[in-house]
Image (cartoon, rainbow, N blue to C red):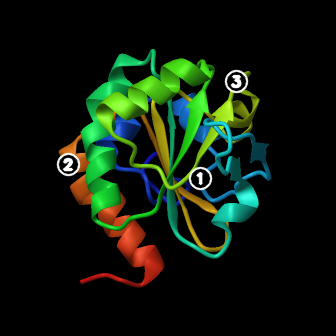
Amino acid sequence: MIGGSLLPEMDVRTAAALDPWDMMLMPIGQPLPPFALPPLEDGGLGLYSDDLAGQVVVINVFASWCPPCLEEHPHLMALAVDGIPVYGINYQDTQPAALRWLDRHGDPYLQVGFDADGSVAEAIGLFGLPQTMVVDRAGIIRHIHAGALDASDVGETIVPLVQRLAGTEP
């Protein structure tokens, strides 16, 4: 039932790149599990599932050592400039490397949680790095994009979905 009611928010190109068995395991339509991550930067906010309650958000899992994360990064920066709330989960990285990476390439994230052991990313259904999710106001995962976002992913899927879920469609 690929592309049917089980996966209504997944775009065809992303779906075609994934193994059908993996797709059946994706938590689309499921609540975002509760989590609490320490801040990436000392004195920062960290990231807690409660921080996301009541808003439509984009959650991006990234690492400084991940080449596709750098490839998609300009698209995350554009989402942030457009006012779309983007939150980050830094996955199995080191704090100094991740902070240097964000300093060098820009920081699109409202808050970043440091997931040193990867347990939170895995609990929310990590299928590959980078991974981007759209979560609705009720905390339900509505879309998962495994792999680097490109301009068409952002323009044709992410932005329209966020606008629809937030009630801000043009």
Instruction: Measure how far apart labels 3 and 1 are at the Cα level.
Output: 25 Å
Q: Amino acid at mark 1?
A: Ile
Q: Amino acid at mark 2?
A: Ser
**In this view of the protein, which residue sits in the foreground, 14 or 102?**
102
Residue in the picture at 68% in, 31% down: 115
Residue in the picture at 32% in, 29% down: 104
Residue in the picture at 61% in, 37% down: 41
Disc nearest the viewer among 3 and 1: 3
Label 1 Cα neighbours within 10 Å, binned few <14 / some 14-19 / many ≥20: many
Q: Is residue 90 visible?
A: yes
> Which residue was labeled with disc 3?
116
SS for tag 1? loop
Label 3 Cα neighbours within 10 Å, binned few <14 / some 14-19 / many ≥20: some
Task: State if disc 1 and disc 3 touch (CB < 8 Å).
Answer: no
Label 2 Cα neighbours within 10 Å, binned few <14 / some 14-19 / many ≥20: few
> Which residue was labeled with disc 1?
28
Residue in the picture at 64% in, 46% down: 44
Q: Amino acid at mark 3?
A: Ala
Identify the mark at residue 152; answer none if there is no mark.
2
Instruction: Measure how far apart labels 2 and 3 are at the Cα level.
Output: 31 Å
Rendered location of residue 131, percent (x, y): 48, 36
